Amino acid sequence: MTGKPLKLRAEDAEDLAILSAALQDAAVPIGDMRFFPEEKRFMLAASRYRWEADRGVKAGGGERITSALIFEHVRHVRRRGLDQGDSERILALLALEPGEGIVDLLFSGGAAIRLEVEKLVCRLDDFGEAWPTIFRPEHKG
C-alpha cells in the first residue's frame, strides 16, 4: 500500500476542516461510536477512504484504512436520526462542522451527532495496514 498512516490533531476550525476532508465518506458502524462521560471523551472507529492515496477510477481504485477519531473535553453528546441499538448499521461520515462550543458530525441519510465541547481538541489516528478497494466514493451533484 502507499503512503504513511495519518496522525493529525485539530485545535481550531481550520485544523478540523483538514480532518473532515480526510474522513469524508468514512464508513462508521454505530456500534463503534462511544462517549465516555467521566473522561469527557468521544471516540469512533471508521474505515476511512484514503483520499490522499487516491489513484482514480481508471488507475485501479484506492485504499481504505482503519482510523480512530477522538474528541477530548466533551460535555454532552446529542444524536439525531440514529438508533444506538442498531449497532451493525454503517453510516457514511460526510463532514465535521465546528460551531461555538459544538462540533457536528454529519452522516448520510440525515443522521448527526452533536458534541458539546469545552474546547476543540481532536485527533485522527490511522492504524493497521491499508487495503485496496475498487469502490471509490462518488458524489452526485
Image (cartoon, rainbow, N blue to C red):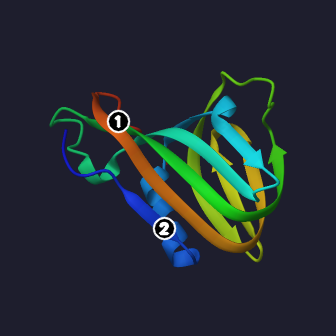
Q: Residue at x 81, y 30 (%)?
A: 83
In the rendered structure, the answer to whether residue 70 lies left or right of residue 26 reads right
Q: Residue at x 58, y 64 (%)?
A: 122
Looking at marks 2 and 1 on the same chain, the residue that comes earlier in the sequence is marked by 2
Rendered location of residue 30, percent (x, y): 68, 32
Dot label at residue 9: 2
What is the three-letter code of the residue carrying label 1? Arg
* Marks 2/1: CA–CA distance: 26 Å
Q: Quadrant of the N terminus?
A: top left
Vertical position of residue 87 compared to residue 65: above or below: above
Q: Quadrant of residue 91?
A: top right
**Nearer-the-camera pick, 139 or 60:** 60
Assess whether mark 1 and mark 2 are in contact (beta carbons under 8 angstroms).
no
In the rendered structure, the answer to whether residue 114 lies left or right of residue 135 reads right
Vertical position of residue 123 compared to residue 14: above or below: above
Dot label at residue 71: none
Residue pointed to by mark 1: 136
